[in-house]
């Protein structure tokens, strides 16, 4: 079935215009007409419904280009909210965003750990209630809750199939349970796709631009935004850069293949390598803290790498070299011209990763004579995934014209 | 800018209906209405313009489902033609196709070799004239000429930037020159994309299906069909699987990176490895034929591999293992569920490649528990690229609704 025909409904036209207003900042009706190809009469009609619905407001005047000064329109960012939750083993973060995807308030609580899924969901639901009350946000003004989780997922059932969680999560319908517990719409998305949509909604990327976001937490994932929406592939598992093999005869990965990025370069892999390096392990007191979260151990190593410990730096540079080779392959295959490095894994040693990935793409990208590949840091704070999850709600609710049938 | 809005014109609706008729074989107006979501009145109006234009004919009746037996429609395949040309160093192939993409006649002439571009284009134009005359095809019934070439290209200027051609081609506007010489519309596309669109137009793939076609000639390329069109990326160079690194510390590739599929697994790489294997080189009489086309030497090695020469088989199996790892990475990143192996490189030893690629994807695809990845042979005959090039013409002319803005 021709998927594009479906995109022709008036609801989609309305959402496309709303998206143009959002991504433009401030824009006049005439500019909207020029950018969309729709007549000024059609634009005026659509803008009227957006203003009546409280989503758009008039905000001053543009310079005159001869006649009357045109009225400027902008998104009424404060009219509604989206809530993002990142569901992690070690920590659960909540972020409340306005319609521009700007984070207004955030909060974090202990992670899911080994608790039963329903227990965790009930705890998150109670915390959401308190969080909204504290900031005097009415539930009826919250569009929905976006939930970010690591690893493979079955998006049709809203189920997380993650190796970081206990087995019970694998059959647990997160979307349905959290919706039941909060009486709000819920949407589940993997962390890398959340991060990519977070970049998209940050306003730094134009809606016409394709890009990849490499998301590093304890593992490495990738979210691809193509033609204004997350590229999903056959089963919503596209962007699986972690199992790109960088050495066909390398060490075996849990997926069964050899030399995967996952086993060569992730924070988990760096912590494993550090354990084999007795002096480094002792010097950073990692031995005494055996059993602590991989993320914390990696942060210790990354800090050492950035503050002159040459052994730690060598481990991080080696990881960055592998990551750069994987990103090179990704850029060659998708013919990308823009890549972001996002997620807490880049919070400390981001500059080392950025330098090496940029260098490799500048020197070796196959299309380098045709166009450069820009590599930039994305959001690396602890709330990156949660803010991204809120963007997923905005993306789904405000710009359905992007979604594939 | 919202690209989907542009897809809403009536010309696109018409081409989407034409595409539905083509991909259905025979179909009634009621079925078209069901499949497209358009009303029967709209369908009747569009079908009338297609019949008046000679593109569609009525072809018998469907079974009755109660009332009158519905009239079946089909593409009037013989009403127009598309011509495909594969422009290769060693051989130039011409294929004439009907509107279904079925090859009616083919012909081949000596390759471009070291001749000047304009000399080659003039020769091709004369040959096209003779070819059409011989088969009594009027120029006015030819929609256009598709040209397939290897390697990077600048599609905006219709220029081939291929390492297989002499430097003069790099600034030569093939599309403009062949259009001038034949007075027919011309479209240039790389061989892997031609092969992918050839599979798409073969009728074996539904228009709703995403897939990759691995195209092996002397090198290895990849064409991706996503959402009914070639996925191009930022500069029409997407699908560059040849420079996926399979060994970060492996042998250096001409692109500057190390361990690329190009340097590990292509027919050119196999011929290089065979040269280092003195006994094999002597046994297959390759020494005496030094300097002959890589394709011919590789065919000799592939034939030996398929007929019991264990050294030759080992070389081919090693190449297939590398290719399988690259295809695994591609399938993981795009979350593909369908891959074709096409092109003359698979003509002889195709069964070895098919067995190994299938095995690796069955065992190791990251999403294997969610869905299998089907691997099938595509077209491997010498005319595969030329037939694919004719499909590019059909795709561009008959189904513009697929093309991105």
Image (cartoon, coloured by chain):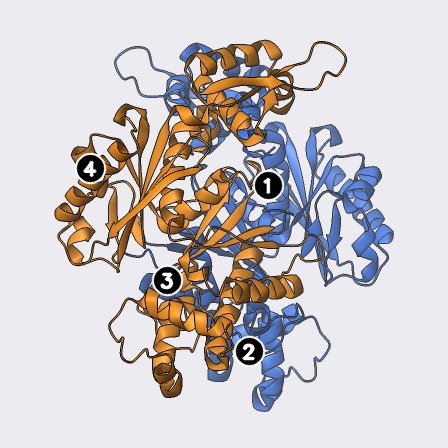
Chain colours: A blue, B orange
Label 2: element kind: loop
In front: mark 3 or mark 2?
3
Residue at image mark 1 = A391
Please give the name of the residue rendered at 53% of the width and 38% of the height, measured from the top-left corner: B203
The quarter of the image holding the C terminus of chain A is top right
Q: Residues within 10 Å of mark 3 (few under 14, many from 20)?
A: many
Q: Position of residue A7 (x, y in %)?
A: 55, 26
In front: mark 2 or mark 1?
2
Q: Contact, CB < 8 Å: mark 1 with mark 4?
A: no
Q: Chain of mark 2?
A: A
Residue at image mark 3 = B219
Q: Chain of mark 3?
A: B
Q: Give the answer, above or below, for where B3 lies relative to A368.
A: above
Q: Residues within 10 Å of mark 4 (few under 14, many from 20)?
A: some
Label 3: element kind: loop
What separation in Å lies between label 2 and label 1 (alpha carbons)? 38 Å
Of the numbered discs 2 and 1, the one sitting upstream in the chain is 2
Q: Residues within 10 Å of mark 1 (few under 14, many from 20)?
A: many
Q: Quadrant of residue A39?
A: top left
What separation in Å lies between label 2 and label 4 (alpha carbons)? 49 Å
Residue A250, label in figure: 2
Q: Chain of mark 4?
A: B
Q: Position of residue B248 (x, y in %)?
A: 44, 74
Please give the name of the residue rendered at 17% of the width and 34% of the height, measured from the top-left corner: B180
Q: Position of residue B77 (x, y in %)?
A: 45, 27
């Amino acid at each position: 079935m021709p998927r594009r025909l479906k995109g022709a409904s008036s609801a989609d036209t309305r959402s496309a215009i709303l998206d143009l207003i959002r991504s433009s900042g401030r824009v006049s009706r005439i500019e909207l007409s020029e950018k969309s190809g729709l007549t000024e009469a059609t634009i005026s009609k659509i803008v009227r419904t957006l203003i009546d619905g409280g989503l758009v407001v008039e905000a001053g005047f543009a310079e005159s280009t001869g006649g009357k000064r045109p009225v400027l329109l902008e998104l009424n960012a404060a009219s509604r909210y989206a809530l993002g939750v990142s569901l992690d083993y070690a920590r659960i973060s909540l972020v409340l965003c306005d319609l521009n995807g700007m984070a207004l308030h955030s909060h974090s609580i202990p992670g899911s750990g080994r608790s039963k899924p329903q227990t965790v969901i009930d705890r998150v639901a109670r915390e959401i209630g308190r969080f909204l009350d504290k900031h005097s946000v009415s539930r009826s003004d919250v569009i929905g809750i976006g939930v970010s989780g690591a690893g493979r997922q079955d998006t049709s059932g809203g189920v997380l199939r993650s190796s970081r969680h206990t087995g019970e999560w694998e059959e647990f319908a997160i979307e349905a349970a959290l919706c039941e517990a909060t009486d709000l719409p819920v949407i589940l998305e993997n962390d890398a796709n959340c991060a990519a949509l977070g970049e998209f909604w940050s306003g730094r990327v134009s809606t016409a631009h394709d890009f990849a976001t490499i998301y590093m937490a304890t593992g490495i994932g990738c979210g691809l935004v193509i033609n204004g929406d997350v590229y999903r592939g056959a089963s919503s598992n596209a962007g699986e850069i972690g199992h790109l093999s960088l050495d066909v005869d390398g060490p075996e990965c849990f997926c069964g293949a050899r030399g995967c990025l996952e086993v060569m370069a992730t924070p988990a892999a760096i912590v494993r390598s550090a354990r084999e390096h007795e002096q480094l392990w002792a010097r950073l007191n990692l031995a005494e803290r055996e059993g602590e979260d991989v993320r914390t151990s990696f942060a210790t190593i990354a800090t050492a790498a950035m503050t002159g410990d040459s052994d730690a730096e060598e481990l991080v540079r080696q990881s960055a070299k592998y990551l750069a080779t994987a990103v090179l392959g990704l850029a060659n295959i998708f013919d990308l011209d823009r890549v972001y490095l996002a997620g807490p894994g880049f919070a400390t040693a981001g500059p080392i990763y950025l330098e090496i990935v940029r260098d490799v793409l500048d020197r070796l990208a196959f299309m380098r004579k045709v166009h450069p590949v820009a590599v930039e840091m994305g959001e690396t704070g602890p709330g990156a995934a949660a803010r991204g999850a809120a963007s997923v709600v905005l993306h789904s609710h405000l710009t359905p014209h992007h979604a594939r049938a």
